[in-house]
Image (tube, rainbow, N blue to C red):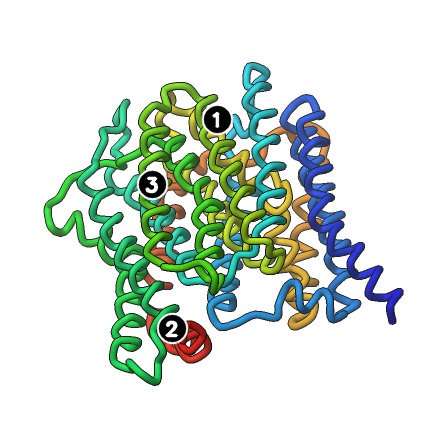
Amino acid sequence: METINDLAKLFYWGCVIWPLVGMIGIFACEGQAARARCHFIVSIILIIITACSAYLADDFFLSAIWSSDGLTRFLRFAIAVGAGISTILLRFWAPRSLFFSKEDKRLLWNLMLFHLLTAVSLLAVGVNNLFLSLLFIVILAALLMSGCIFNQGSSSIKAGWAYFRLVLLFAVMAVVAAFLLASVPIDNAPYLAKFSSVLLSFSLVLIAGLFPMSLPFLGMTMELPLTLGGIGSFILSVPVIATFLRLYQIPAYEPPENLLIILVIVSLCFVILNEQNRQRSSLCLSSLFLVALSILGGIFANHIEGIYSACLFIIALVVFAPLGYMMSQKQRDHQEACEGWVMFALSGLPPIGIFWACAVLFAYLMQTMPMIVVTILGLFLIRGYILFQKGRNIFFLQGMFSKEIQLILGIIAVQTVLLPLLTSSWLQQIAVEFVKYHGGSGS
């Protein structure tokens, strides 16, 4: 039995390490066709590794991947949708200029270094399944959706700080609700706990799509507040926030108001860094700064549990990244800033990347619905056969651009409007369970 567990651990860490090797292989290839084929090979090997790990069905795999609470199940559902959509986009609708050019070697190595540091920081930090993780997922989705709505192909993106401030308002509401849920004993203050759960659900649903969707109907014409590179650097602060969220849950870390102060300071520092982001390399510099804070926070926390939650935390952001590229294909002037989104989605470095997200989803389906897995695998092999055909040197079908916008808008509507509406009551029930489980811990 111990040998099986050791083998399962080997497969599990293979799911984490192999995408790193795959990324190096992708960038070692010359030409887009070679990179496409390498991408397929890396994916198919990763599927085999995860299938073996899933078939073992050992305690380590289940505890590391699927033993979780209601919130993580909610996150898994969102990630599964995003991973599937992103995979379809990358396989069938990926633009020609998918990868960085030779002039971007420096940025490539900086991104690789950032990914490695992020992996180290997440190993040092235990991130619990707090509602704020979902908050950042829907913030990114809302920003991408708003970009599709407001950005009418103009050559430059104005700083629409009004919209950003409104989104930030709902984010602060969600943060306050999460603090109330974690600190209020449900037996002593049931109405306050109920109010907190409703406030959190309300804030998340508004951020996810109801509020952004209402802007055009209200006659408010705003554009995306940040450039695509700015959004990319914005979401990279997630490890820092996750670190301090973990710190505030430690009983010795009192009072919790200190965390709010820390979050404000870090946010202000990040906004300043983002405002100075006139060169693409500054994205990596600010990222390294934030990851360094995460590492320090993780060492201070001295807690190594919750690595899977951290993986969910980041992956859920990354799986929506291809939408950022599709959103601005017509903007030739900003095309180089958009390629980073596809890079994040394809990199697969531990614990980030579409490889890892799809691998976990595939392993879960292997255990629960093997027929679906066989169907997906068959379609995947057919796509691989097409990629390896002689003379096949492009990812996407010709003449598909007119349909891409409709596809993207439909995807965004599902992710940011329909899903929050259908799952808002579910999220409220999760909040009540969270209160029951954690409410008495502070007393």
Of marks 3 and 2, the one in the foreground = 3
* Residue under numbered circle 3: 265
From the top left corner, tell me how far across and down residue 212 is, in percent: 24, 51
The answer to whether one can see residue 397 in this image is no
Determine contact: label 3, label 1, CB under 8 Å.
no
From the top left corner, tell me how far across and down residue 303 is, in percent: 60, 56
154 sits left or right of 230 in the view? left
Which amino acid lies under the numbered mark 1 shown in the image of this protein? Answer: Leu
**Mark 3 residue crowding within 10 angstroms, few (<14) / some (14–19) / many (20+):** few
Front residue of 1/145: it is 1
Corner quadrant of residue 364: bottom right
* Residue under numbered circle 2: 431
Callout 2: SS: helix
399 sits left or right of 156 in the view? right
Which amino acid lies under the numbered mark 3 shown in the image of this protein? Answer: Ile
Q: In the displayed structure, would residue 152 be above or below residue 378?
A: above
Q: Mark 3 or mark 1: name the one nearer the start of the chain.
A: 3
Which amino acid lies under the numbered mark 2 shown in the image of this protein? Answer: Ala
**Mark 2 residue crowding within 10 angstroms, few (<14) / some (14–19) / many (20+):** many
Distance between the alpha carbons at the discs numbered 3 and 1? 18 Å
Point out which mark residue 285 bears: 1
Determine contact: label 3, label 2, CB under 8 Å.
no
294 sits left or right of 161 in the view? right
Distance between the alpha carbons at the discs numbered 1 and 2? 37 Å
Q: Mark 1 or mark 2: name the one nearer the start of the chain.
A: 1
